Amino acid sequence: MQNKRIISDVIIKRTQPKPAPVLPSVETLLPEKEIVQPYSKSKFKPISSKAEARSVFKGLRVTGIVLFLAVFFATAVILITFKSSRVEVRMTPKSAELTVNRTFVLSRSGAAGAIEFGTLALSYPMSGSFASGEKKSTETKAEGTVVIFNKSSKDPQVLITSTRLESPDGKIYRIPSTVIIPGLKVENGKQIPGSKEVSVIADKAGTEYNIGLTDFTIPGFKGSPKFETVFARSKTDMSGGYVGNSQIVTKNAVEAAAAELISEANKNLKNIISKKLPAGSVLLPGSEEYFILSTEVNPKIGSPLPAGQKFEIKLNAEARGAMIKEADLAKAVAKNDLDPASLGGGDFRILNLGELDLKLSGYKYEGETMRADVKGKVKMEAAIDIENAKNILMKSGVDNGAGVLGLFSAISRAELKYHPFWAGFLPGKLLDPMSYSGHIDIQITSR
């Protein structure tokens, strides 16, 4: 039993585990003063201060402004391009030729089988200054206007024809016809003399009777109280008195001056009338005339002209002419010789009206009927209503010449161009120049 060993007597020596090696810190591995933020799941760097936050927001604001300006300028360019853009549409109408040698009846009332015509009159006065080359010995008396006063009584005063008026220097002027001067009246206790304007003529011819404003007495009342109470005062100067050789306004000089004015008027007569014709009308060649209503001459015929002066002449006149509707003449000329369907079935016009031999017979401005002889080779062309064509184009949505050609049966050729060329690529229907009448420019090109 003594040799028996007990396990509890065996003491087992425990070894201590080795401590884990101490790794150097991150700070010791980095250069001095450099700090690394701990790893974050977010991909953005955290904002650590108000200054940094302001910097970030400032950057975002700048970016927003840049984007806004870019959109603004892009929009402005589009709008400016649209405002200045236009679509040029060139159309060549269908045409035909025929030879005509016919006489047509024209009627003011539009009688059956006749072409209706109308007339036009425009005020067209002419005036000018002209010298008279004719001289002769002349004697003229000065003339003027006076006011004669009556302070003698309440009774009217009668002055007979040739009653004399005398100026302070003794010059005599006479009343050409009998006049009655009203008597004085009393208003608010005051006496108001009666008065009347009267024309007077110098007793003799000569320049010495050309005088300024002055007072006159009536020699016939000398020796009576009326000499002081019935008197006259000038309202105008006395003028026109002359004795000697001078240029005279003669009838021949006036007629020559009028002929010169008429000749000048006739040079522009056709253009003046044509500009005032109603739309769609044409002036009938040979119907234009310069019609004189009255003639004014100053000074009047027979009056002397002071040295170096001219007389004035004015013609109160009208520019007159006859007109017909172009479509009516074209239909009359083409009747039985042209199928309207060959020109699209609509209205058509004479392209070379000025080249035709058209003569009027029996024409009078006040007349009811006349005849027109028409000869020559007539060029017919389909008539295009520009405004109606624009409306059709705006509704169609076409953007090429072939599309335009398909819209109008009266044209044989069409061409479409955008100006500037990129205007056709503007975005949106609202910016398409073809959608606005003011941006469509239709050009008619005749063959």
Image (spheres, helix red, strand yellow):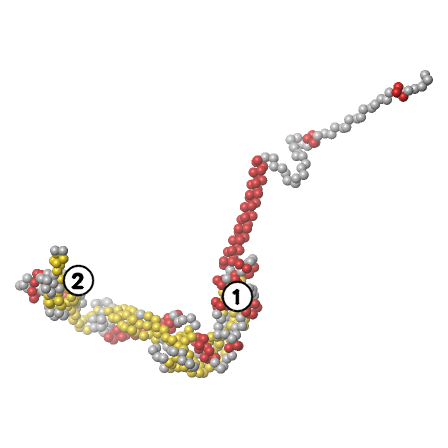
Residue 271: tell me if it is visible. Answer: no
Please provide percent x and percent y for residue 430: 53, 59
**Which residue shows up at 74% across the image and 28% down it?**
22
- Res 19 → quadrant: top right
Report the residue that reaches farthest toward the front.
1
Q: Decide: few, some or many residues near mark 2? Use Cα within 10 Å; few <14, some 14-19, many ≥20.
A: some
Task: Give the spatial CA distance, label 2 vs label 1.
Answer: 74 Å
Please provide percent x and percent y for residue 326: 44, 75
Q: Is residue 430 left or right of residue 33?
A: left
Q: Which residue is mark 2?
A: 235
Q: Camera-side residue: 348 or 27?
A: 348
Element assignment for label 2: loop
CB-based contact (under 8 Å), mark 2 and mark 1: no
**Which residue shows up at 53% across the image and 60% down it?**
432
Q: Identify residue type, mark 1.
A: Leu
Q: Which residue is mark 1?
A: 393
Q: Identify residue type, mark 2.
A: Lys
